[in-house]
Amino acid sequence: MTETCRGLASGLRLDPGLVREAREDARAIVDEVLAYVREHTTTSMERAALRLAGVEEVDAEGTPLVNLVVDRLGDRLGHGASYWLFNAVAVTGREPEEVARAVAEGELDLGRLPAADPARVRQLGTGAARLAMEAIDARRRERDVMVERLGQSPSPWLYVIVATGNIYEDVVQARSAARMGADVIAVIRSTGQSLLDYVPHGATTEGYAGTYATQENFRIMRRALDEVSEELGRYVRQVNYASGLCMPEIAAMGALERLDMMLNDAMYGILFRDINPRRTLIDQYLSRRISARAGHIINTGEDNYLTTDDAFTAAHTVIASQFINEEFALRAGLAREQLGLGHAFQMDPDLPDGLLHEIAQAALVRALFPGCPIKFMPPTKYKTGNIFRAHLQDGLFNLVGVLTGQGIQLLGMPTEAIHTPFVSDRYLALENARYVMNNARHLGEEFLLRPDGRIARRAREVLERAVAMLRQIRDIGLWQALEEGMFAAVRRDRDGGKGLEGVVAREPDYYNPFLDELEGGRCGA
Amino acid sequence: MHEADPVVRPYGDRRDDGAVQVSFTLPVRAGELASEAARALMRKMGLASPQVVFSRDLGEGLTFFVGYGRCTHQVDLATLEVPRLQGEVMDFGAVNRFVRERLGRKVVVVGACTGTDAHTLGLDAILSMKGFAGDYGLERYPEFRVVNLGSQVPNETLVARAVEEGADAILVSQVVTMRDVHLANLTRLAELLEAEGVRERVVLIAGGPRISHELAVELGFDAGFGPGTTPSQVASFIVKELDRRRVTGFRDGR
């Protein structure tokens, strides 16, 4: 902690013993969940494996072949879809995609084929998995080379969202935003995609409040952002959502198409999309393994707790969840510089000294998670339609971001609570952020917080409450904590929600060469 | 001095100066032609002496403008009809007293964000304990029982739950309005309730940033609440409407 506790945050005087205790409790909490993860797989995890094997197409009705193959395997899935696929490859001599198409057309039944020599099946599986890793590694190197050559903005990076529903219109708005200073472009997904148990296919031009995440849409946006990056001489990052019921599949697509960040948080899906906790925590493990390899920065969603719960009284729940999310991420092989742990500027504007409390929270997060590019979310809850006050709220938010050294600043919009942003709203937001951050770039290096002042005392109090909460969760386990509504004031049953039917126990001979390669013999789970 | 004059125009810094501020983007590359286009458009909006005070190239052949002009139109207040919710708004204490004294039983409210809508902010502002703008949410009202179904609830599920819970009122929040998806969704709910024969047994309310009372009534709802609505406004409407139906036999008289 010492290295990043220079400057502002060093005055917080956090108790290192408490921080250690928080991490020990988080480890115990995560151990229990990962013991469960290790013994199960899911339909989406198996579909992700098939995608990594090169199965990308759909049938005549537009149903992804990976869905058809996994559905037809039924209760054979516990052995791993990869076993059945590569057994068929060994027996028929066809490529994985051809095998999948034959299954889709009813010409091939993977369960009725003779068993090939197990060594041959493993050889084929390992070969395919290594090819997939090489493809992911190549995309990662491509990013490294571009960043090296073109350079990138100092943090906080300016992150904006486009959401027209039409990928070609998104491209126009994304390029416009990049030219006005955006460092990161997220294409928000169509409302409801998180609950689809398949990934839509092809370029799409219709969506509700967002654009479908498809592999082709990823490619179209990547191409546009690469062009504008070259033109601007600055690498512009692309974001999408490895969340919902297809979490690991979208992580795989993002790895293959060189996305740079993935929103990825099982807790978010559980609490705000009512996705089954078991299903999504299993899915999250594989998706994080993929993102670790791909060099994605993941973004977690603790900021959302403050939309249903109060930013002042529930501040500690964000910190507690971040410790848990950090542990989940590290155990899936992610490096600290890949952890965009989320929080938000959501205090009630009428709260006296609200700005001081926001600084306390932002400095606390910064101090507790050194090396992580913290994702800072803007005020939304107390935006009223008064666009003039909203612009000022965003100005204070931007000031706190640059003052406390946040990594990724998702810009607030003056028209929040009115409509999806106009292209001019994005310009106003970017200008606001550039103005504030340019003018206050090194302000945080000029001050030390008073250790006995309001900000430092508040930060220490929030940490103490977070540690107490973690201790309580450790005693009852994460499943129980969710059932008791300890996060975001929302209760979720471990056997409730959407997608539990997609959870399958792994057989003793479970085979997944992609997971094996990603784990590289170091099974964090 | 002008209080009796029912004809009004925008007020900048003098009565009747008609001053209006606008901002918009045109798909034209920044330059003289773009600014002229902006002024021409403002004239067509009814703004005399249009001025472009700021313009900025947004890239992609788009230009953003801030402009001022004098509005040539006026509004005669005497000719206007305002669709408005009846009745005074009661506060937390008064609503609960009203329920105890006039209805004599707990009021059951079922709420949801329906269809694909995942934005529960508005619904939670009205229903959750904390409420909105210092006004307690309906869950805090001792005389209310609230069932908050959360986000992305199919209309069918909402209707089934409302029947099961014996709902007095149904609250639907719609935030996503892209391509008017909310209109179709709200209409469908009203139709479903009719089809189930329970429409008249419930007070049906819609809310959201783009919802007005007028629009909601047009879609077959009893009331609509827009941005800035506080829980006590909704609570007042519900209990008064229930009382009105009790008195007129609206609910039980069929």
Image (spheres, rainbow, N blue to C red):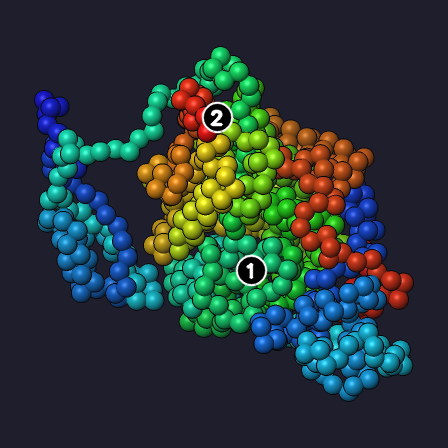
- Specify the quadrant of the image occupied by residue B228: top left
Mark 1: few, some, or many residues within 10 Å (few <14, many ≥20)?
many
Disc 1: which residue: A240
Q: Nearer the viewer, residue A321 or A77?
A: A77
Q: Is residue A127 above or below residue A186?
A: below
Q: Residue furthest bottom?
A: A93
Q: Are marks 1 and 2 in contact (CB under 8 Å)?
A: no
Q: Is residue B19 visible?
A: yes
Q: Position of residue A179 (x, y in %)?
A: 39, 63
Report the amino acid beneath label 1: Asn
Q: Position of residue A353 (x, y in %)?
A: 48, 28
Q: Residue at x 68, y 41 (%)?
A: A492
Q: Residue at x 81, y 83 (%)?
A: A90
Q: Is residue A329 visible?
A: no
Q: Nearer the viewer, residue A454 or A408?
A: A408
Which image quadrant: the N terminus of chain B?
Answer: top left
Disc 2: which residue: B252
* Dot 2: element: loop
